[in-house]
Amino acid sequence: MIKYIQKLKAKKGFTLVELIVVIAIIGVLAAILIPTMLGYVTQSKVTSANSTAASIKNEIDAFLTQCDTNNYGMKKASTNFAVFEFKIDQVSSKTEWLCTNSDENCFADKDNWKSSAATKAYADGSKADTNHLIALGVDLAQLFPEVKVGYITANLVGGKCIGVTYQNSQNAATAIQGGSAKKGSTYEYIITENNKWPAGYVWSDDTQGIDIDGVIVGTAPVIQLADRSKGEGKLSS
């Protein structure tokens, strides 16, 4: 029994100083690694949103090509500029795509490219609808059934889709349509001529793919961060 007690006494635990040192080391490692890991998670979400935007752009280009084949596509002149917007929401347990077109006059068969509050598409909708914008919405709804809530803009020039933005949130509803982005607007970009998107567009914040409300925004082609050394990223007041 005495030997057993002596053995117990011989066993030493950590001293208070040693515990403090270990805790300090863990704190330093956490301070370094946690922000890094959070950055990786955020970047992966941005990459995924960019990929979705690229797929949307490809689908819109394919649809416009099909429209050209049937003589009701977008007019080819470079002065023809239009923006498609798709607001996606859950309505009565169905995914609804509200489709709008900024300028139907840029299209042949313009009467069937018009949009209104009733221009809505559903994944189970008929592609035989005479409204071409609804038909496009149906295509996108079927291609992206996992998108239940979101907002999409597509910039079109001379028969081509030159740029798409995609976000899986409706918190921000300001489309990229050209002009100067004002401070406090949803997207803080420097925006130049409409027909040169994304040239002249840059993220003015320090995080690519995240707007000022913290919403992930995918872009195709991918919009880069502002280059402060070139004076980019300055917003108009």
Image: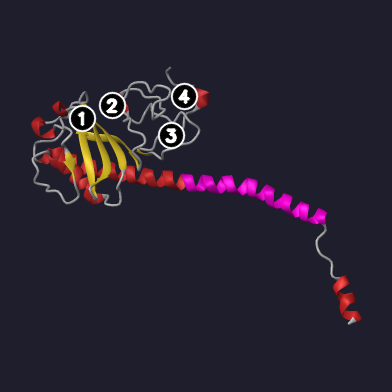
User: Are dots 3 and 1 in contact, CB under 8 Å?
Assistant: no
Q: According to the image, label 4 marks what residue?
A: 232
Q: According to the image, label 2 marks what residue?
A: 195
Q: Quadrant of residue 88?
A: top left
Above or below for 143 versus 221 = below
User: Are dots 2 and 3 in contact, CB under 8 Å?
Assistant: no
The tag earlier along the polypeptide, 4 or 1, is 1
The tag earlier along the polypeptide, 3 or 1, is 1
Give the secondary structure at mark 4: loop
**Quarter of the figure that contains the C terminus:** top left
User: Are dots 2 and 1 in contact, CB under 8 Å?
Assistant: yes
Q: Position of residue 86 (x, y in %)?
A: 25, 38
Magenta residue check for 180: no
Query: Can you tell which of label 4 and label 1 is closer to the viewer?
Result: 4
The tag earlier along the polypeptide, 3 or 4, is 3
Amino acid type shown at disc 2:
Asn
Amino acid type shown at disc 3:
Asp
58 to the left or right of 64? right
Residue under the image location 59 percent in, 48 percent down:
34
Query: Can you tell which of label 3 and label 1 is closer to the viewer?
Result: 3
**Quarter of the figure that contains the N terminus:** bottom right
User: Are dots 4 and 1 in contact, CB under 8 Å?
Assistant: no
The answer for how far apart the CA atoms under marks 2 and 1 are is 9 Å
Amino acid type shown at disc 4:
Glu
Q: Position of residue 181 (x, y in %)?
A: 38, 23
The residue range painted magenta reads 16-42
Is residue 65 among the parts visible in the rendering? Answer: no
Residue 158: image tag: 1
Is residue 174 among the parts visible in the rendering? Answer: yes
Residue 213: image tag: 3
Give the secondary structure at mark 3: loop
